[in-house]
Image: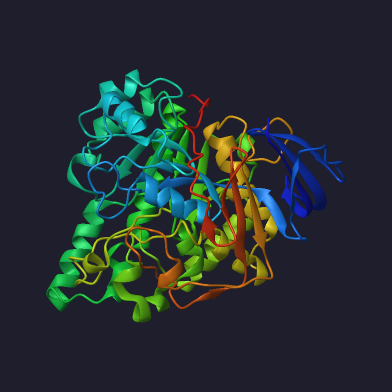
Amino acid sequence: MNKLLITNSRLINEGRIQDAEVLISGDRIEKVAASIDAAEGTEVLDAGGRFLMPGMIDDQVHFREPGLTAKGDLATESAAAVAGGITSFMDMPNVNPQTTTRDALADKYRIAADRCSANYGFYLGGTNNNIEEIKQLQVGEACGIKVFMGASTGDMLVDDPAVLEQVFEHAPLMVVTHCEHSPTIWENEAHAKSTYGENVPMTEHPKIRSAAACLQSSSLAIELARSHDALLHVLHLTTAIEMDLFSKTHRAEKRITAEVCVHHLWFDESSYEALGTQIKCNPAIKTAADREGLIAALNDGRIDIIATDHAPHLASEKNKSYFEAPAGLPLVQHALLILFDLAKSGSISHELIVDRACHAPADIFGVTERGYVREGYFADLVLVDPNKPHKVDQSNLLCTCHWSPFEGHTFSASIDTTIINGVVAYQNGKLSGVTAGRRLDFTRSR
């Protein structure tokens, strides 16, 4: 069995930073200690004082397969994720065909087999018409049930009150929600059109996709979850006002948890002037006060998970007018770098990054033996060099869409090495070419 010893690292894990060495045997972590003797035949990787951490588990991505592969696919986007230190991802159901039946879910897993650089799991999507599919879902078949409680595409919008009641009553797994109140959004759109016609400026986006629209929908989701004692995870929160809906207690004591995405921690409404539709996303990037409110909630425990909502579109699509440009931006390759820059600025700590981007997704979704640097766990690890800046440009972008809102920006840190299931998948700026990702095992039920 191949063995790899990582020496001279600064391990960030379980709320501590300490000098440590980690021995990997096959696909597992065999030993974690201050000093480990390398047996004959063991490969040694000198971390050179770099940070070592469990790989990020991204609980929300849109990798566009099947059916939308001009924008990206499971192979290309998972490779970009690995280059960004993401070792596992959970992909959303709004593809073509939509993942709204158990058969479609099984097909998606078949498509993914032996093609993903990172470990993978998939959501079943809720609709106004598939409650029986939801009822029949078995633990382990999906990471959760995605419900769009806001304007979406096709029949992925679940806006029938009776259906929502049934979903929360009968869901055998966690319900994860996109929360925006569509009638409020539609009313705001009509007002913007009456003022600007079709040439609505991007600065109107956070007013159209308003804080009030978010609060009304997230409040309803929480009310339904409490009424039916359902597990609920509210995705990509964007407003300070919503933070009062969530508890500061540890995630182990919660049945309702919250997520924030990296772009909502980084950008605010002042960024629209320079970046325009490049940062159009739903829910919208909002005010500087909202951004600060999210960071505060992250620090005090009201927000449990950090994710990306990676949603690539072609540059030709994004370079359109407000109503024609799709929402979403590519983020997996730079998510951890964003977080390390926030740590350098003092907004968050390195320990918090690992807790919310690695440990918490594993705990909340019941991901088996991943998300921590523990003996016996799968060896999904990342070395981050905090002293080697990384400048984003066209030459180092790996997503199919091949653009980024961070082009020209220099991050203070860089991803040195990413290890998936004991295999080096990315190192020194290059992918190894090995496809080491496996299907994630989910054990958490209602």
Residue at (47, 41) in percent of width and height: 435
Residue at (44, 27) in percent of width and height: 173
Residue at (67, 50) in percent of width and height: 53
| Frontmost residue, 403 versus 241 | 403
Residue 302 appears left or right of 64? right
Residue 21 to residue 205: above or below: above
Residue 365 appears left or right of 178? right
Work out which residue is located at the far bottom of the displayed protein and give it: 273
Work out which residue is located at the far front of the displayed protein and give it: 41
| Frontmost residue, 213 versus 316 | 316
Residue 103 to residue 284: above or below: above
User: Quarter holding the N terminus?
Assistant: top right
- Residue 103 location, x and y as percent? 27, 24
User: For residue 312, what is the image quadrant?
Assistant: bottom left
| Frontmost residue, 337 versus 325 | 337
Residue at (59, 36) in percent of width and height: 363
